[in-house]
Image (cartoon, rainbow, N blue to C red):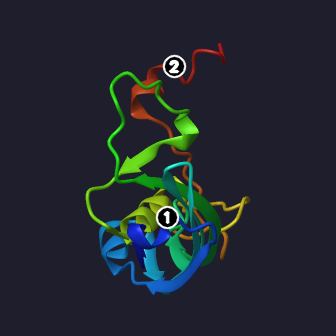
Amino acid sequence: MLIHLRELYGKQEKVHLADKIDISDIVDNHLSISKSGLVHTEADAIYEAGNVRVNAHVHVDLELICSRCLAAFEEPLDFSYTELFSNETPKEDEEPADIDDTVNVVTEDKISLDPYTKEHILLELPMFPLCSEHCKGLCPACGVNLNEEACNCTEELTDPRWSGLKGFLSK
């Protein structure tokens, strides 16, 4: 999705853009994503106070890998983000803007929103995806998915380094 800055300078009206983005490069390099649909992005760009403000809304259906049981599950991501762009470099004596209003200084007249959308997708991904809040995970001894079946392991798993203390409290 390309935004042409010169077309927006001086206009007082919003420009609406819509596009679909392929994020197969993210899927290939991210261990917790197994599949992804196309990313649907809609953006409104407007010129205000010497900058171009882009408000974008993103929707993508992902198939993630649960960090406890390793099962694949579907998870939609639906979020919005805002970016500010300018062709002018800030002057040294100017006060820095608020942290929320960080301006991306660009040298080109055309801006591709694809890298910004991909960055925000990575920021929206859960750090440890879970198929459900009450996921039981895998049995540490036999590896069976405890959400699907009960484990037949009867061995008590203890760390051998603590075995010397096992009978200490029974005396």
Q: Residue furthest left?
A: 107
Q: Which residue is mark 2?
A: 165
Residue 133 relative to residue 4: left or right: right
Give the number of callouts. 2
Q: Position of residue 54 (x, y in %)?
A: 54, 63
Q: Quadrant of the C terminus?
A: top right
> Which residue does the image show at 45% across and 46% down from the upper left?
103
Nearer-the-camera pick, 134 or 99: 99
**Mark 1 neighbour density, 10 Å: few (under 14) some (14–19) many (20 or more):** some
Q: Position of residue 80 (x, y in %)?
A: 63, 63
Task: Say what secondary structure mark 2 lies in.
Answer: helix
Q: Depth-wise, is mark 2 or mark 1 nearer the camera? A: 1
> Which residue does the image show at 49% across and 69% down from the upper left?
8
Task: Say what secondary structure mark 1 lies in.
Answer: helix
Query: In the rendered image, is residue 59 in sight?
Result: no
Tell me: residue 37, above or below residue 5: below
Q: Residue furthest front?
A: 10
On residue 83, which mark appears? none
Q: Is disc 2 in contact with disc 1, using a CB cutoff of under 8 Å?
A: no
**Mark 2 neighbour density, 10 Å: few (under 14) some (14–19) many (20 or more):** few
Q: Quadrant of residue 33?
A: bottom left
> Which residue does the image show at 31% across and 67% down from the upper left?
109
Nearer-the-camera pick, 151 or 127: 127
Q: Position of residue 13 (x, y in %)?
A: 64, 71
Question: The residue under label 1 is which amino acid type?
Answer: Ile
Query: In the rendered image, is residue 168 in sight?
Result: yes
Q: Which residue is mark 1?
A: 121
Question: The residue under label 2 is which amino acid type?
Answer: Leu
